[in-house]
Amino acid sequence: MPLRTEPNKKITITSKNYLTVPAGEYACGNGLYLIVAPSGGRRWLFKYQYTKLKKSMGLGSAKLVSFAKAKDGAIDARRLLAGHNKTDPREHRDDQRRAAACPLFGPYATAWRETYQKSLKHKSSRNKLKRQIEVLCAPLRKMRLDEITTDHIIKLVLDPIRHQVENARDIRQRLKLIFDCAIGDNHRKDNPADYQTRLRPRMGKAPKRGKVRGPHKPIAYRDLPAFMQTLATSPDLSARALEIAILTVARTAEILNMQWPQLDLDRGLWDVSTIGILLGETDGGEGTKNEYDKKTPLPRQAVAILRKLYENRISDDVFPGRALRGPMSNMTMLKKLKEVSGDPTLTVHGLRGTFRTWAQDETDYEEEIVEHCMHHITGDDAEKAYKHGEALKKRRAVLQAWADFATNAPAQVIALDRAS
């Protein structure tokens, strides 16, 4: 039972009398209490409520901790409770004590991420890494680096996402790098996330992604002209974005980030690589998936669509979002695709596969040029080092033939000048 002073006896605790008051429990303000045992022992106690539960936290012996320091400790604890994250002060103190012996995974992994992400070129890759470390690995954050075992990694992190093959693989690799760093910093002697010696013997061989890369279902190219005719009747901006994606065989991110300064409609040219320069993030290539700059010839059907959009432009974004603070959502085109096609399994990225199948089945264009239209630079590193040409004329011919097929337009001879 807690000790209490006599009901009619009120004693105000001060810096001068806290070592002399009789046995009892004395409220000192801000949740701070002085507990005096019959034996004479004195200690500071902070009482509080967290998640609707009454809790307490010791602040030390009154013989070692002064009244002023105890009050400061109670105020600091109340700030944690009232802060944005509403932290339990006792858990916060325990984490600090444990981290003094060995760093906690959370702060250590965050520091590693902030350094490692500097090597990642694309913002999407950096965001993906942040989510993996800060969200998917959250169950490990309050654990000390030297306490984490392979079983912790499997049960807390990998098992919940085992069905996400690529995600699980990426997190395994990231965790291995983090614990390799911890070994180098003398915080561990072994790596609990090593795939060959720790994870695979317990989890078995990781499943493969499958023979076909990615679940990107395409539209059959023979059905594309009818689809394009239906799409053309939609007045939505998402329909125009989808049309440009099909006619240019561009990736979704490239379409969403398309900006008017990138476009030369007179020459029929889209310089995708300039997006990084416009954003002040890079010297070029930021808007593309790989490290190569990209200039896409625009078929005349795409130019016609873009000219109409240009007349009603409201920002530098060709396809702005509703808030006009950036591009439209990456789900907008997918929603329109499913709506017009009536097939919920189709993907926007799969439309690139429609183009590739059409080129293979219906044309005699060079495979290298067809791949270049999709911005797939073929060859090994040595071969790529000598490929400085852009093949604009050849790619313009392929994309125009593709646009003619997709829109069911009669084929025309394309006049090419040297600037194209």
Image: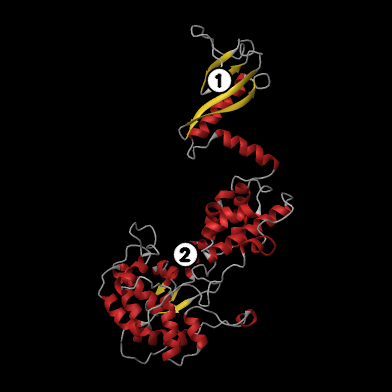
Q: Count up the numbered dots.
A: 2
Which corner quadrant of the image does residue 406 belong to? bottom left
Q: Position of residue 195 (x, y in %)?
A: 66, 63
Please name the residue that numbered disc 2 is placed on: 278
Q: Position of residue 99 (x, y in %)?
A: 66, 41
Please name the residue that numbered disc 1 is placed on: 33
Q: Secondary structure at mark 2?
A: helix
Q: Earlier in the sequence, mark 2 or mark 1?
A: 1
Circle nearer the viewer, 2 or 1: 1
* For the residues bearing labels 2 and 1, Cβ distance under 8 angstroms: no
Q: Position of residue 398 (x, y in %)?
A: 43, 87
Q: Secondary structure at mark 1?
A: strand
Q: Is residue 390 above or below residue 252?
A: below
Can you name the residue that lies furthest to the top here? 8
* Residue in the foreground of this view, choosing between 382 and 147: 147
Q: Is residue 418 visible to us here?
A: no
Q: Is residue 124 visible to us here?
A: yes
